Amino acid sequence: MTALAGAAISVSGVEKSFGDVHVLRGVDFDVARGSIFALLGSNGAGKTTLVRILSTLLKADAGTATVHGFDVATQAADVRESISLTGQFAAVDEVLTGRENLVLVAKLRHLKHPGSIAEDLLDRFALTEAGGRRAATYSGGMRRRLDIAMSLIGDPPVIFLDEPTTGLDPQARLEVWQTVKRLAEGGTTVLLTTQYLDEAEQLADRIAILHEGRIIQNGTLAELKRLLPAAEVEYVEKQPSLEDVFLALVGAGASTEGGDR
């Protein structure tokens, strides 16, 4: 495929196998700068494997990929300086308080005024009252919000969110959604994997469906919905949802819930 001019992320022919298991079989896509790109796939489709390759944690067997203009294989250090990665499980230090976690990351990034940065993020993620408590006392949702807040320190141009709202209550999910939208509005590029189809519908500028190691469809929500025939109008017109499109493409037996490779 032809790379999108000025793309924040460009992936071409990426392959990855673990022994005899072929997880990625030639993945191609581009992500425009300042956009939100959602990667959907059934359990074990390879979404996390792809994110690990793009974040330089894993090497591809074949193909090329660039992030923020840097090759993930030959310019790994430059890629790491340009990205932030939030994995499926919160990576916070439970011995430290929420505020101390944020201050520590800000200091590691050699940023000025780490205390002010921490206070701002605690406020944005509704954690101010809990900021002085050890993270070990936080609920799962609170730890997740703290983890995402930590990933935003330093304003990286590209952010990978791997299942960003897993375990969050509805209110916390909405808060994360609003934060992600604000990031894109400010020019940050966001690639997210999600098990929630409504999350992709709410957030993504483009959605790619990964199935059996390949991207089988890639488009806007409106473009994907047009893949199914228009609903017949009887009493109430019902347009196809993203869930209808996903299940039609990968099969009704597929599930987006649970873990991922």
Image (cartoon, helix red, strand yellow):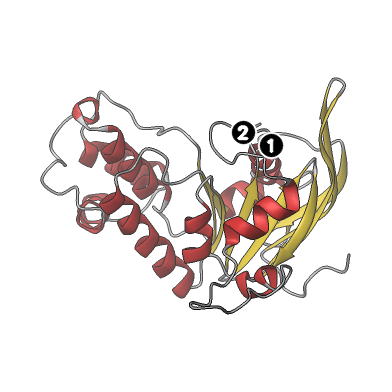
**Residue under pointer 1:** 49
Q: In the displayed orientation, state which residue is furthest to the front.
A: 234
Kindly report the distance in space between the C-alpha atoms of the residues bearing marks 2 and 1: 8 Å
Q: Nearer the viewer, residue 147 or 45?
A: 45
Q: Give me the residue at 30% from left, 33% from top.
A: 140
Q: Residues within 10 Å of mark 1 (few under 14, many from 20)?
A: many
Q: Give me the residue at 60% from left, 67% from top.
A: 240
Query: Given the image, on which type of amino acid does mark 2 rest?
Result: Asp
- Figure quadrant of residue 181: bottom left
2 vs 1, front mark: 2
- Looking at the picture, does residue 44 appear above or below residue 128? above
Q: Give me the residue at 25% from left, 50% from top.
A: 118
**Which numbered marker is on residue 260?**
2
Q: Is mark 1 on a helix, strand or loop?
A: helix
Left or right, 85 with respect to 6, comes to: left
Left or right, 162 with respect to 232, comes to: left
Q: Which of 221 and 27 is in front in this view?
A: 221
Where residue 169 appears, as percent x and y from the top left, is 29, 45
Quarter of the image with the N terminus is bottom right
Where residue 28 appears, as percent x and y from the top left, is 81, 56
- Looking at the picture, does residue 92 appear above or below residue 10? above
**Which numbered marker is on residue 82?**
none
Query: Given the image, on which type of amino acid does mark 1 rest?
Result: Thr
Residue 72 seen in render: no
Question: Answer yes or no: do the residues labelled 2 and 1 have beta carbons within 8 Å?
Answer: yes
Where residue 192 appears, as percent x and y from the top left, is 55, 52
Q: Which of marks 2 and 1 is nearer the N terminus?
A: 1
Where residue 50 appears, as percent x and y from the top left, is 70, 42
Quarter of the image with the C terminus is top right
- Looking at the picture, does residue 255 appear above or below residue 4? above
Residue 212 seen in render: yes
